[in-house]
Image (cartoon, helix red, strand yellow):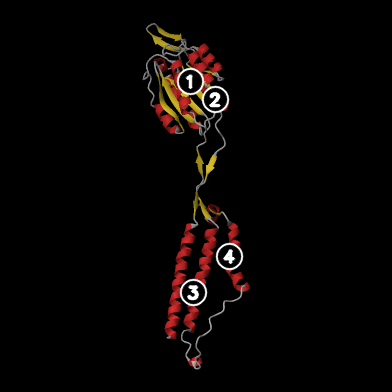
Amino acid sequence: MMASLFDSLTWQWLWVFALLPLPLLARMLLPPVRRQQAVAYVPFASEWPDANAAQTDKYERVRLWLAALVWLLVIVAAARPEWIGDAMELPVSGRDLMLAVDISGSMQTQDFEMSGRAVDRLTATKAVADAFIERRRGDRVGLILFGSNAYVQTPLTFDRKTVRRLLDEAVIGLAGKATAIGDAIGLAVKRMKEGKTAASHDQVLILLTDGVNDAGVVSPIQAAELAAKRGLTIYTVGIGADAMMIQSFFGSRQVNPSAELDEKTLTAIAEKTGGKYFRAHNTKELQQIYHLIDKLEPVEKDKQIYRPRHALFMWPLGLALLLAAGFLVVRLYASNHRNCLVR
């Protein structure tokens, strides 16, 4: 408890305490003040009872202690005491990282597995991307959802919890059944430019899709070239199994649910922007891809710690002023009391 107290209390000018014995040195070295000589001589004054001697000594002691305490408080205030608050971690502006997630109709294909049960591609994406977003401490993260159209679900923000929640609320087909990869990249470039700050460093887009660009007004290659000019790195992820069994009227048969995945275009997009293309056939590979992206685009490790400082000098200074006023009151009272006895 005491150690914590001393750690939190600091002094800006600790050397000021060296001035503490200054009044005592002045009393010892300077000549005493001459008292005023009496204007009248009373030959029988020695016969008066010294009734006020003890009272005068008491007032002198009170004044002396008050003066000493006032001087001590002035020294404490002059040393500029400060209370250091608890350490707080400030958000570190690392990367601007945007996730573009495909929510077109094909993402409902159940060729992924989680906890021993078959799930659709979007459900697997949500689970893996959720953990990825949580790890991006210090980055501003945003979310774009796209199908036939692309729209910003979450702008760039340090609030990773909100990004995760809104990703979890994404619904297949909400943006249309088709896939506008070019429009999603174009929208990411625009929002990255608008959200860029002086503290922003690298800008990264992670685009996840399971299809081919068959909608939108901007071609993926044109959008990638624009992204490269703006310094945006794009990592593309193709999602979907190469084979799965389906039931039909004639029995079970094996199909390729990723036949429409345009890996050539996704590879070209990544290469033009200095990124990389990844292929996720299952949940485990998708997890590995996001961990690999963590290594390629590491989180800022240097944390900024801030401890708020609260000045305390006004408290001893205010108390010193109050005691100084009390010192004057005692002095005036003692003077009036002595005058009354003389009369």
Chain-order first, disc 1 or disc 3: 3
As helix, strand or loop, the secondary structure at mark 4 comes to: loop
Chain-order first, disc 4 or disc 2: 4
Viewer-proximal residue among 76 and 308 = 76
Q: Residues within 10 Å of mark 2 (few under 14, many from 20)?
A: some
**What's the distance in space between the residues labelled 2 and 3, CA to CA?**
75 Å
Q: Which residue is mark 1?
A: 207
Of the two numbered discs 2 and 1 in the rendering, the one whose residue sits closer to the viewer = 1
- At x 60%, y 70%, the residue is 26
Q: Which residue is mark 2?
A: 293
Viewer-proximal residue among 103 and 112 = 103
Viewer-proximal residue among 240 and 331 = 331
**What's the distance in space between the residues labelled 2 and 1, CA to CA?**
12 Å
Q: Position of residue 58 (x, y in %)?
A: 48, 78
Q: Which residue is mark 3?
A: 62
**What's the distance in space between the residues labelled 4 and 2, CA to CA?**
62 Å
- At x 50%, y 80%, the residue is 57
Of the two numbered discs 4 and 1 in the rendering, the one whose residue sits closer to the viewer = 4
**What's the distance in space between the residues labelled 1 and 3, CA to CA?**
80 Å
Type of the residue with mark 4: Leu
Q: Is residue 115 visible?
A: no
Chain-order first, disc 4 or disc 1: 4
Q: Which residue is mark 4?
A: 20
Q: Residues within 10 Å of mark 4 (few under 14, many from 20)?
A: some
